[in-house]
Amino acid sequence: MVYQWEPQVQYNIGAVVEYGGHKYRIIQPHQSLSNWTPPDTPALWSRLPEEGCWEPHPECQPPDFHDGKGPSHSEQERVHQEVPNEEQKKGWHGLDEHRKKELEMGGGLAVGLALLGGGYLAYKGHQKSEEEKKAQIWSLQGWLRDAQARTDEFYQQGGRGNLAWILNKGRHIPENAIVGGHEHGKNLYICRAFHEGGLQVGKASSVFNEGGVIGYKHHEIPFGTYEILVGKPDAVRWVESSGTINVESLKSRGYEPIEGGHEDNGTPLYVVQAPYNNGVHPGKASTGLPSAFIPYDGSEKAVKEYRVAVKA
């Protein structure tokens, strides 16, 4: 049966909804949010053809609405396979060749492909082998699965503790988002997004074209699907720091720095804010960096003096 799409509903594999006069089939199980309508979330929903049957069988293939910017709708329509958590945690290179082929043919990479088409373009992707690209797609959708689980827990149970990372889409900022800085009289919020095998910390705002940006290898990279830090306003304190962050020193003084993400090699990235050009911008610091780094004006800026976000 086809139901009208609604927010705050748990949609699972097999669900088909109608929205705006069109039908959509689910790609990724999730709990719907008010600003995550099917047309706006190609990583979660795939639009069905307008005429004829739409059940998945060889005689009924949807039309190809390929726009040249990502995977075609027919590619996204491939049957999505449930992927066990333990298998996802292995990483692409930990799977045997038979299982890799099963996932490729059965649509097990469909969610990652959809996200790549929605803006998650590989950094210098032309330099990667096909196997490296598949590994990145696999990791990307692993992040999305985990992020969706965190989001579901937050909305269903209120999260754990005073802070939580939840998925967000576009320029709408949740009311309980944590302020990480400001520019031109507008608040900047703390966000993070998967990129090049890591989870990079950045900033979000209703004035950004896609909603969120992160900094990576001296570039500012926009994202329309990202996680944003939410919680109680008094759950975060800011502690002065400079140069390479000294995590042990902070902990010895009773501070617990907030880990926002990690590099592709697993090195933790901590949430910071730094003054720059008459504003204060959220960004990242790590034990492997000589200073804090913030995304700004199309690039990434190094700032020696900054403040670390710690749990209050």
Image (spheres, rainbow, N blue to C red):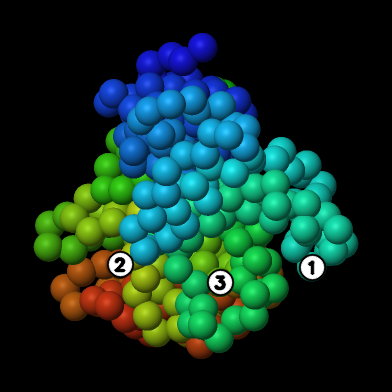
Label 3 neighbourhood size at 10 Å, few (<14), some (14-19), many (20+)?
Answer: many
Residue 41 in percent (x, y) is at: 40, 42
Residue 294 quadrant: bottom left
Q: Is residue 220 rendered to the left or right of residue 147?
A: left
Mark 3 or mark 1, which has the lower sequence index?
1
Which mark lies nearer to you, 2 or 1?
1
Mark yes or no: residue 195 visible. Answer: yes
Query: Callout 2 environment at 10 Å: few (<14), some (14 to 19), or many (20+)?
Result: many
Instruction: Look at mark 3 in the image and give the residue it sits on.
Output: 196
Q: Under tag 1, what secondary structure?
A: helix
Q: Residue at x 27, y 26 (%)?
A: 20
Q: Marks 3 and 1, Cα distance to the nearest angstrom?
A: 15 Å
Amino acid residing under circle 2: His
Front-most of residues 19 and 173: 19
Asked whether the viewer can see residue 261, the reply is no
- CB atoms of marks 3 and 1 within 8 Å: no
Nearer the observer, 201 or 271: 201
Mark 2 and mark 3 lie on one chain; the one further toward the N terminus is 3
Can you tell which mark lies on residue 93? 1
Instruction: Identify the amino acid type marked 1.
Output: His
Q: Which residue is mark 2?
A: 281
Q: Is residue 137 left or right of residue 293?
A: right
Image vertical order of residue 113 relative to residue 200, above or below: above
Q: Nearer the viewer, mark 2 or mark 3?
A: 3
Q: Secondary structure at mark 3?
A: loop
